[in-house]
Image: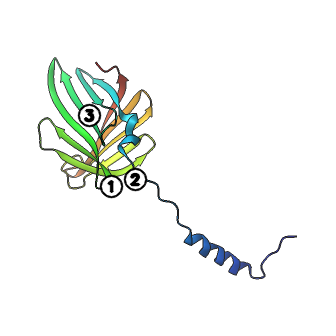
């Protein structure tokens, strides 16, 4: 025989209050080691342009990367990037084509996806990476440029590093 309390509403309220006092365990903050899926060499071609991006494996509290855009045998753009653990979060630091570096703090992270944000940066304000499979990686930059939102995708495929 099941014992039921006489005042079902009071029992439910008590149960709800008890449940409210149980805190969900906090998940540990993301670490550089969580980003191993980003390591490797990635490429995309669009017309005569080829973009290659390379990320070293996580080590020493940092991921180091670089990219280069080449067309007709000339380097058009290049970028040195790193993801570092800083002040309890992850930070994406980019230095494109010799410009001053810009930092973007972690906005969100999920399984094989990471987004960084710097609302005060001119463009982009967000930088993201997502891997749908071991051989694909989509990088993107997005944010407000002038009076409109803009997003630029970089759909990479894995290539041999050499």
Q: Position of residue 103 (x, y in %)?
A: 22, 48
Q: Residue at x 30, y 31 (%)?
A: 56
Q: Name the mark nearer the viewer: 2 or 3.
A: 2
Q: State the separation of the CA atoms marked 2 and 3.
A: 22 Å
Q: State the image quarter where residue 1 is shown.
A: bottom right
Q: Point out which mark residue 148 bears.
A: none
Q: Residues within 10 Å of mark 2 (few under 14, many from 20)?
A: few
Q: Residue at x 15, y 27 (%)?
A: 76
Q: Is residue 154 above or below residue 10?
A: above
Q: Are marks 2 and 1 in contact (CB under 8 Å)?
A: yes
146 or 158, which is in the foreground? 158
Depth-wise, is mark 1 or mark 3 nearer the camera? Answer: 1
CA separation in Å, label 2 and label 1: 7 Å
Task: Point out which mark residue 88 bears.
Answer: 1
Disc nearer the start of the sequence (2/1): 2
Which residue corresponds to mark 2?
29
Is residue 140 visible from the viewing direction of this image?
yes
The residue beneath circle 3 is 65
Q: Residue at x 37, y 44 (%)?
A: 114
Q: Quadrant of residue 34?
A: top left
């Amino acid at each position: 025989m099941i014992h039921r309390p006489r005042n079902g509403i009071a029992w439910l309220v008590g149960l709800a209050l008890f449940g409210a006092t149980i805190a969900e365990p906090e998940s540990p903050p993301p670490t550089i080691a969580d980003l191993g899926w980003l390591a490797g060499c990635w490429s995309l071609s669009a017309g005569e342009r080829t973009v290659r991006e390379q990320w070293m494996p996580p080590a020493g509290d940092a991921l180091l990367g670089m990219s280069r855009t080449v067309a007709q045998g000339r380097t058009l753009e290049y970028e040195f990037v790193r993801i570092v653990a800083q002040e309890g979060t992850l930070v994406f630091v980019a230095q494109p084509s010799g410009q001053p570096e810009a930092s973007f703090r972690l906005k969100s992270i999920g399984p094989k996806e990471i987004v960084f944000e710097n609302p005060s940066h001119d463009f982009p304000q967000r930088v993201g990476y997502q891997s749908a499979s071991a051989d694909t990686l989509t990088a993107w930059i997005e944010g407000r440029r002038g009076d409109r939102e803009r997003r630029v995708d970089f759909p990479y495929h894995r290539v041999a590093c050499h």
